[in-house]
Image (spheres, rainbow, N blue to C red):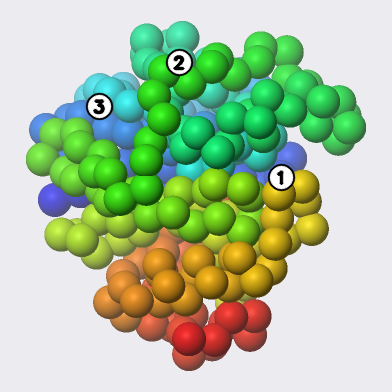
């Protein structure tokens, strides 16, 4: 059975996720660690749990989700995986970091693999389906585990909220369509692990989210 560990990193309070199962293999999603203390927190957890990272994935490539890419890639000898439509966003990282006054001294490596919508992310005994959920960013992906009923959602759907759409490549209508057609069709009991804030459930958001109704 897969488990999800959450870490809140960097000034944007971004959620980094480690998804792992009984084999000890794990995937690191959106490493936002931005200093030595945060890097140590992540590594210590992995060592304590005796986990072996086998994949590094960004749901999307806004600066708060990529600050730790270089560290994780080097620390665990992993190649970055993203949707191809996020490449321009990834490459704008240094400019955006300067705009926000955030230290981004070691830039993210280039991706070694482009994840296509509908493809399966496999590790250990776990499989996650890549759902194409643009709107907050040009080509954001969410990752759904049908067996264990959870979703790594990036900045698409939050507890009683949704991702902002006023950034370059964002569009409210596109985001709402993604949520309705890709996420709200999932079972109500599916746990949503968002890029910021507390976890929630699909059924709860369908009933209570003020921004997007089914």
Residue 33 position (above or below residue 162): above
Residue hosting label 3:
51
Say whether disc 2 or disc 1 marks the residue closer to the N-terminus. Answer: 1
**Side (left or right) of 86 relative to 43:** right
Tell me the CA gap for discs 2 and 1.
21 Å
Say whether disc 1 or disc 3 marks the residue closer to the N-terminus. Answer: 1
Residue depicted at 58% across the width and 37% down the height? 86
Residue 199 on image: x %, y %: 46, 64
Residue depicted at 82% across the width and 25% down the height? 95
> Is there CB contact under 8 Å for labels 1 and 3?
no
Label 3 secondary element = loop
**Side (left or right) of 211 relative to 25:** right
Badge 1 local density, few (<14 within 10 Å), some, or many (20+)?
few
Say whether disc 2 or disc 3 marks the residue closer to the N-terminus. Answer: 3
Label 2 secondary element = helix
Which dot marks residue 12? Answer: 1
Badge 2 local density, few (<14 within 10 Å), some, or many (20+)?
some
Badge 3 local density, few (<14 within 10 Å), some, or many (20+)?
many
Residue 211 on image: x %, y %: 64, 80
Tell me the CA gap for discs 1 and 3.
27 Å
Residue hosting label 2:
73
């Amino acid at each position: 059975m897969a488990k999800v560990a959450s870490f809140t990193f960097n000034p944007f309070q971004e959620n980094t996720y480690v998804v792992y199962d009984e084999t000890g293999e794990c995937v690191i999603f959106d490493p936002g660690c931005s200093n030595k203390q945060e890097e140590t927190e992540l590594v210590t957890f992995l060592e304590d749990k005796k986990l072996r990272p086998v994949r590094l994935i960004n749901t999307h490539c806004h600066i708060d989700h990529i600050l730790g890419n270089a560290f994780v890639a080097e620390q665990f000898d992993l190649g970055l995986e993203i949707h191809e439509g996020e490449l321009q966003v990834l490459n704008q990282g240094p400019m955006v970091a300067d705009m926000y006054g955030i230290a981004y001294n070691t830039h993210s490596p280039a991706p070694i693999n482009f994840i296509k919508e509908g493809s399966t992310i496999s590790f250990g005994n776990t499989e996650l389906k890549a759902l194409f959920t643009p709107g907050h960013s040009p080509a954001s992906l969410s990752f759904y585990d049908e067996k264990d009923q959870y979703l790594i959602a990036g900045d698409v759907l939050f507890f009683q909220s949704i991702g902002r759409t006023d950034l370059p490549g964002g569009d409210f209508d596109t985001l709402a369509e993604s949520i309705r057609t890709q996420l709200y069709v999932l079972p109500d009991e599916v746990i949503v692990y968002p890029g910021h804030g507390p976890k929630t459930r699909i059924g709860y958001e369908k009933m209570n989210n003020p921004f997007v109704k089914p």
